[in-house]
Every structure is written in C-alpha cells, then in structure tokens.
Image (cartoon, grey):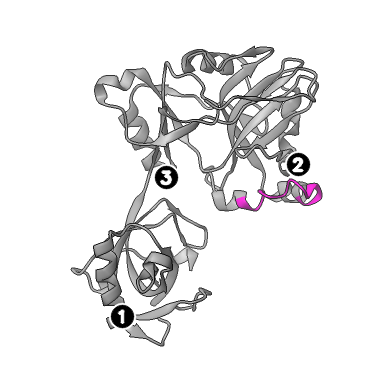
Amino acid sequence: MAAPGRVDTFPVELPLIPPMLATPGALPPPAQDARWAYETKQDGQRVMVYLPGDGRALLRARSGTDITAAYPELRPLGTALGTTAAVLDGEVLALDAEGRADFQLLQSRMGLAHAPGRAAHRAASVPVHLVLFDVPHLGRRPLLRLPYTRRRAELEGLGLTGPAWSTPAALVGHGEQALRATREHGLEGLVCKRLDSVYEPGVRSRAWIKIRNMRSEDVVVGGWLPGKGRLTGLPGAVLAGQRAAGRLRYVGGVGTGWSEDERAVLAALLRAAATDVCPFDPVPAVPGARWVVPRLVGEVRFSTRTREGMLRQPSWLRLRPDLAPEESAADVPDDLV
C-alpha cells in the first residue's frame, strides 16, 4: 500500500492520500451480490479534495497536482463543513444539456490551473459539478482502515449537497439492475465496491471493480497508418468512417483489438485496396495516412461519441465480409455532420 505523505500547510495536518483505483472486471457472482455496493461510473476528472477547516478547499488530481484554480466554482466547498477538516474522494464532471457527464466539455476546463482568469471566464459557460463518493480522512481521524460501509455512512452524514457538488446514493445489491440502468441512460458504466473494503491509497484494488459500458457499430475502412517497431510493414491503425448524408465521414483511428494473424490478414487486404484518393469527405488531417478504396467493413467497440461524432476509445472487433460498405448499419447522426 502506498504510504500517505503529509500536507503540512493546513491548520489541521491532513494526509496527502492518492486515490484508490478500481480494477476492470465484471459483475460479482449473483451469490455475492449483496456483499457489494454499486455506484455510477462517471466520465470526469478524479480529484482528492482537502478541506482544512479554515474556509479553504484544495483539489488535487490523481497525479497529485494542485488543480484548485481550474475550478473556481468549487471554492465555496471549503466552508461547507465549517471547522471540520476532511479529505474527500470524488470526480469533477461537466454536464451536457441532458445532465450527463461529457468529457469533451470537461477538457475545455482541464489544464487551466495556471490560468485562473481563463478558468473563471470558462466557468461561466461550462460549469462543473463535483460528485463525492468517499471520505478517507475526517477531522483528525484516518478512516482508511474502516470498511466501505462505515466510510460511506460518515460521508452521507456530512450532508454535502451544494450548488456545485453532491453525494449521489450508492445501491447495495441489485448489480444487474444497476448496470442495466447505466446502459439505458447512456452512462459510462458502473463501479462495484465490496462492502468490507478498506481504502487503499494509490492501489488498483480488486475490492473495487469498474465496468465500462461499450457499444459496437460497423465502420468502413478508408485508410490506415503504418505501424512502427515490431509492426513495421503492418497497419498500426485503420482509419474508420461511417455514412452520413451520402458521404463517408471520418470517425476516428482504431489501433487496438487485433491478434498478430488478424493484423497480417488486414495488411494484405489494405494493400490490395490501395488508392491515392482519400475516400473521406471532408479529408481528415491525419499525417502519414495511406488511403484505400472503401470496401472493407469492420465492427468496432467504443465507449461513446464526441459531440463531433468521433468514436472514443475504439477497438477492433472483427471484419464483416458479410456486409458491403453501403450496407453497414451504423451512420453518423445527422446532427453531428
């Protein structure tokens, strides 16, 4: 377990605690369902919040970097507990018009910790919201060795609901229903937390399991990027497109998901389809791209789309020789064209 450092500038000496991390996995077995709590996985920036009890609030990113100035609307949280000191674990979100976390919106706020003037200006148009889900330290008491249920009770007892922060409820048991709900509402996924789990600073623990909802759609291959190193002569990534308003629109590069044999087969197919004409409209700014006649259809898995229709975190699933390019089922939404 990573040893906490110290933050010595606070009136109450608070420990510098790296966030506990979740391990990718699947739902616990049904027989163990009641031993786990389920929280919505949010698509935001993980933060540890330090409240020394003197009206200040300090936010640190997962790396430990001070990012307080990037989110001026969260400063009032420093007075939310009066003189009670605390270290809180949470996630900073930027919400879209439907109230869902939008990481692309948040990116316009991240990185402004050294530009407080720009951060304040941006906060007016893209406000953030902090969701809190753990309290590893409260007052002068470390809560690291307490089970999740005790820490969660302590957190909920603080009543931290404000104009830019909240403490969403966790669901004990009913994991399948919770996961289904995240999918139905287009949310990123689910975090499963064992009820007896202690807080392990900086550790990627099996006591916390994250499940990311992934979607799959068909894409048309319109180009590729040469691989490097051991992949020299092979595709390092394919350039994927989808039909929209009668044209092939570029939706991103896909660089993972193949076995060595699959990559070799794909390389031969791409060489046979080589062309000097870019099939995408408009032509994407992809340095080093090699274009192909858009006749290969593949299926890819991805987490979500950006507002421009680009695929986030895409990975290759399989070729679809049963589909012609014009038959690929998935089109870019018209409002993203």
**Is disc 3 placed on a helix, strand or loop?**
loop
Give the extent of the magenta segment.
Answer: 107-118
Identify the residue at image location x=33%, y=71%. Answer: 220
CB under 8 Å between discs 3 and 1? no
**Residue 104 percent across, percent down from the top left:** 56, 53
**Is disc 2 placed on a helix, strand or loop?**
helix
| Residue 79 visible (yes or no) | yes
User: In 3D space, how far apart are the residues under numbered discs 2 and 3 (Cα atoms)?
Assistant: 31 Å
User: In 3D space, how far apart are the residues under numbered discs 1 and 2 (Cα atoms)?
Assistant: 51 Å
Amino acid under label 1?
Answer: Arg
Q: Is residue 116 magenta?
A: yes
Mark 2 = which residue? 69
**Residue 20 percent across, percent down from the top left:** 52, 29
Foreground residue among 255 and 45: 255
State the image quarter where residue 218 is shown. Answer: bottom left
- From the viewer's perspective, is the residue at label 2 or at label 3 nearer? 2
User: In the rendered picture of this protein, how many numbered marks are placed on residues?
Assistant: 3
Foreground residue among 3 and 81: 3
Identify the residue at image location x=22%, y=69%. Answer: 323
State the image quarter where residue 222 is shown. Answer: bottom left
Disc assigned to residue 271? 1
Amino acid under label 3?
Answer: Gly
